Each structure stands twice: as structure tokens, then as C-alpha cells.
């Protein structure tokens, strides 16, 4: 594709937060993602659903170049964030991941204090001029992670000493501390009990005021509760992408209907 066409495409995509065109992912000889095209909106929770091994987490990891860390993985096609090609050679993946935060399946706080878990990203990206700035960022992030009131009196205690649900909210606070524009969540509630899950789901709903949130979930009920848009993946293909209510009540593709009603998966 020549430069002009790329620029035209990028301008045309300005309306979406993330725009993926003809994305293919290969792990060695395995074709894991086949020709995925999707437009992800800002201030929206987008859920990726589908059976285990269908490619939803692999595609999620394309959105902040986490697949770069896997030697045998090859990603082709175009992914734009605000019209900028994230796979352009001039894009620094570390800077990209400050813009596109990630929360993993298992809570993974650093073996540091609660304060240092949150302060880590702003420190390495130079977002605070002094200690007072850093204190403000830490407090704001912990509030956004809906955990400030539980930890404000023990900020120097280890993050690993928190409960599973608190650790996951700490990881969300850590992810938002670099002021990302997009927050990726890979099954963020699968290791949590129902009460902690409900707290994280409530938090996801609040976070969409400031971020574009993309969540991979194996729970269709969760997708229905938290998202406005849903993408159904099956065998590496993006089968259907639409408003969540439409996907769950009136899907176009028989494979989506079979999955929703429990006949495949």
C-alpha cells in the first residue's frame, strides 16, 4: 500500500478509537487469526466472546503489540489507534503500552508496596515532576480503581498482601496511572469470586467514561452486563460484531446463535 492510500485510510478511520483492517496472526505454521476487520469506539466497553482457543485473547494482544514478545508470532494487516499505525516501525511499543493499558486474567501486582505498584508507570514515563505530583497520580489512580478507601492507610504495605479482588483493582489502578486511552482486559474476573467480580464489573462501567475498554470474557452473562458492543470469534474468525443487545437477542450468523444458545463452545 502506498503512503497516500495509508494516509487516506487513516483519515477515514479517525472516527474509531481503534481500527483493525485485514489482521492475520500466525504462530509458526498455525493461522490463529484470519482476516479480522473491526472498528472499536471510544468511551465504549467492547466484549470479545467465543469458545476457548478461538483467537479472542490473541487478537486482544495485537492491540498493544504484546504478541511482539512471542518469537514465532507474526502479525500482518493494519491496526490504527486514533489514525496512527501502531505497527509502524517508528512506534515504540513501550510508549504504545502506556497508551493502551492491559489487565490480565490473574491479578499480578509487582512485589512492591501498593504505592509503588501504581507509581511505577508514571515514574518510568516521566509523568510526575515531583513527589507531590506522584502522590496525586497514585491517589487519583487508586480512586479510579475503586480501591482508595480500602488501602489509603496502608499504601506502603505490599500489594501482594491484598485479597484477589483487591489485587485486581490495584492492577486496574496501575494500568490507568499512565493515563492510557484504551484499557485491554483479558478475562479480568476469571480468578475472582462473585462479589469481587461484581465490584470489577461496576468499575468497568465507570471506566468507560474516560477510556475505550476492550474485555475478553468467557462469560456471556458478563459480556451482556458490561458491554455496549460485542464481537464473536470462532476458529480464528471474527464471525459477527454488533451492539451487544443485538448479538444476544437477534444475531445474524447461525454460528453466533449456536454459541449464545449453548450448542457450540
Image (cartoon, grey):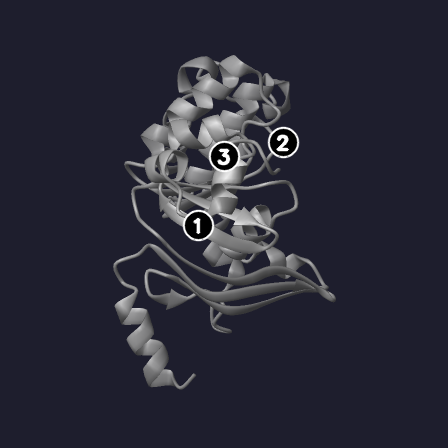
> Can residue 216 be seen in this snapshot?
no
Query: Can you give x and y, in whole percent of width and height, for residue 199 in the image?
Result: 44, 19
Q: Is residue 64 left or right of residue 176?
A: right
Foreground: disc 1 or disc 2: 1
Instruction: Return the disc, 2 or 3, that comes first in the chain's sequence.
Output: 2
Residue at the spot of label 3: 260
Query: Can you give x and y, in whole percent of width and height, for residue 173 in the image?
Result: 45, 32
Q: Helix or strand or loop: what does disc 3 sit on?
A: helix
Instruction: Please tell me which residue is depicted at 50% across the width and 13% down the height of the picture.
Output: 195
Residue at the spot of label 1: 240
Residue at the spot of label 2: 106
Instruction: Please tell me which residue is depicted at 51% across the width and 17% down the height of the picture.
Output: 196
> Can residue 99 be seen in this snapshot?
yes
Q: Is residue 251 left or right of residue 48?
A: left
Q: Quadrant of the N terminus?
A: bottom left
Instruction: Return the disc, 1 or 2, that comes first in the chain's sequence.
Output: 2
Q: Helix or strand or loop: what does disc 1 sit on?
A: strand
Q: Is residue 151 left or right of residue 32?
A: left
Query: Can you give x and y, in whole percent of width and height, for residue 6 in the image?
Result: 36, 78
Q: CA distance from mark 2 to mark 3?
A: 26 Å
Instruction: Please tell me which residue is depicted at 27% across the width and 63% down the height of the picture.
Output: 14
Amino acid at each position: 500500500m502506498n503512503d497516500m492510500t495509508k494516509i487516506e485510510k487513516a483519515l477515514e478511520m479517525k472516527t474509531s478509537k481503534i481500527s483493525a483492517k485485514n489482521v492475520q496472526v500466525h504462530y509458526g505454521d498455525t493461522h490463529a487469526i484470519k482476516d479480522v476487520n473491526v472498528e472499536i469506539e471510544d468511551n465504549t466497553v467492547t466484549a470479545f466472546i467465543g469458545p476457548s482457543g478461538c483467537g479472542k485473547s490473541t487478537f486482544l494482544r495485537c492491540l498493544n503489540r504484546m504478541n511482539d514478545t512471542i518469537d514465532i508470532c507474526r502479525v500482518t494487516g493494519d491496526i490504527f489507534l486514533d489514525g496512527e499505525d501502531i505497527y509502524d516501525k517508528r512506534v515504540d511499543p513501550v510508549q504504545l503500552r502506556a497508551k493502551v493499558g492491559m489487565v490480565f486474567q490473574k491479578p499480578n501486582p509487582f512485589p512492591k508496596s501498593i504505592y509503588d505498584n501504581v507509581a511505577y508507570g508514571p515514574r518510568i514515563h516521566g509523568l510526575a515532576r515531583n513527589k507531590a505530583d506522584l502522590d496525586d497520580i497514585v491517589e487519583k489512580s487508586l480512586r479510579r480503581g475503586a480501591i482508595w478507601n480500602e488501602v489509603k492507610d496502608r499504601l506502603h504495605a505490599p500489594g501482594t498482601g491484598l485479597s484477589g479482588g483487591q489485587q485486581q483493582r490495584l492492577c486496574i489502578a496501575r494500568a490507568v496511572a499512565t493515563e492510557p486511552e484504551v484499557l485491554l482486559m483479558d478475562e479480568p474476573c476469571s480468578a475472582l469470586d462473585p462479589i469481587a467480580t461484581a465490584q470489577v464489573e461496576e468499575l468497568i462501567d465507570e471506566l468507560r467514561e474516560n477510556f475505550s475498554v476492550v474485555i475478553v470474557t468467557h462469560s456471556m452473562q458478563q459480556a451482556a452486563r458490561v458491554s455496549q458492543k460485542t464481537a464473536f470469534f470462532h476458529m480464528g474468525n471474527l464471525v459477527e460484531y454488533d451492539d451487544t443487545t443485538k448479538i444476544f437477542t437477534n444475531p445474524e450468523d447461525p454460528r453466533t446463535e449456536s454459541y449464545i444458545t449453548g450448542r457450540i463452545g
